[in-house]
Amino acid sequence: MQTGRVLLISGILLAAALAQEPSATRRPGRVLTGWGGGKPDEVVPQAAAIGFSELIIHHDNAAVFARTIELGRQHGIDVYAWMYLGDLPAWKKAFPDAEAPMQVMSAAEQSALAALTADTSLGKSGYQYGGEPVRAGEVLMTPLLCLHDPRVLEAFTRQIDEILAVPGTAGIALDYVGYQNYHTCYCPTSTRLLEAYQAEHPALPANVARQRFSLESLVEFNRRLAAHAYARRPEAKVITHIYPVYLPEPLYGNRLDLDVCGQTAAWYFDPLWSEQKIRAYARVIAGEAKRYHARPEGAAMIGYYNAPGKFTVKSPERLRMELQAILDSGCTRVQVCSFGDVLRTPEAAAVFREFFGPAATP
Ligand SMILES: [Zn+2]
């Protein structure tokens, strides 16, 4: 009787503690962040049970965004708004009467894009969809706005204002902030700014000047977006995933002065990355996160799609190897895209739960 009552009271206290302290259901010291979408009432509780601490979703549906935030608060999950440089509706909203200033590629890169578009083979002959290419001459198939056009910065700072006005938003998550051809932009605005850069750096060979200008302006675009968010709401967080790849320096993400920089440690497609490469990248992602700035934490990004017949689906053993390699390398933050694919694949969800959930193994 006495024991039963103690157990009952303990159970009530435990339930109350769990309700007030949702992080108790997660592995301390580890952060799992998911990019994706879905019905809030389905995905948020499931994500919490697996051990997700953060979800990144689109905010264009205000009701879905608000509901996700509300459920996230109940389940101890921070919700971020997904922003991306291919967001033409965001441009249209800010500048309805102006033509969108898209990035421009060289004639050869345009031909590569046309060939990729026409390629109907499975996996498009090894195309990496914006990850590190395995074949020469890849470009991103998604058109991107030119980050050198000041109006693009203006459009996105307005979007940040809208997002941060939503009560309970943790912050913004940046995606597709890069170059469609993985290294530069040839539009008239970029060309004019590059010429000014060359005039300021007359000793640099033309190719070096282009590369430095392209990298420095990419870093600066990120800095201005993040600085705008921090000025607007000091407690807001800015996180990102470096994508598409920037070929001259794939792991440049630690140059960005924002809260969390996700960099790819294990990409989606065949040939899947070797354990050696995953370990090497994760060591840099975590170990050199503060090389340029005190603020950033590094996060290792894992690609996961469950689309059999379209792409190879990573096995549970494969996912376990990738996560273990990342954690062994000192990286305790992991981003996965898409979290919806993880949630609807029980064997994948179980692996993530092993590493991030309440019963996480050391
Ligand atoms: Zn441009």
Image (cartoon, rainbow, N blue to C red):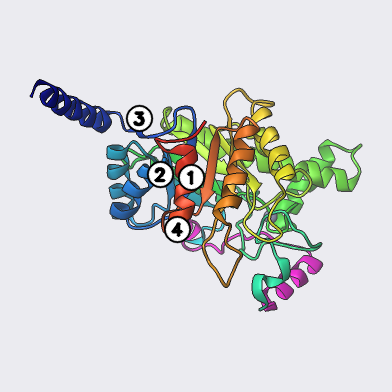
Ligand 1 placement by image quarter: bottom right
The residue carrying mark 1 is 352
In this rendering, would 134 be left or right of 42? Answer: right
Question: Quadrant of residue 283 in the image?
Answer: top right
Q: Magenta segment range?
A: 90-119
Whether the residues at callouts 3 and 2 have beta carbons within 8 Å, the answer is no
Look at the numbered disc 2 and say if its residue's Cβ is closer than 8 Å to ligand 1. Answer: no
Instruction: Identify the amino acid type marked 1.
Output: Phe
Q: CA distance from mark 3 to mark 1?
A: 16 Å
How far across and down, in percent of the image, does residue 59 sit? 39, 52
The residue shown at (80%, 45%) is 211
Question: Quadrant of residue 301 in the image?
Answer: top right
Work out whether residue 112 can be spotted: yes
How far across and down, in percent of the image, does residue 224 sit? 57, 37
The residue shown at (64%, 46%) is 264
The residue carrying mark 2 is 50
Q: N-terminal of the two: label 3 or label 2?
A: 3
Whether the residues at callouts 1 and 2 have beta carbons within 8 Å, the answer is yes
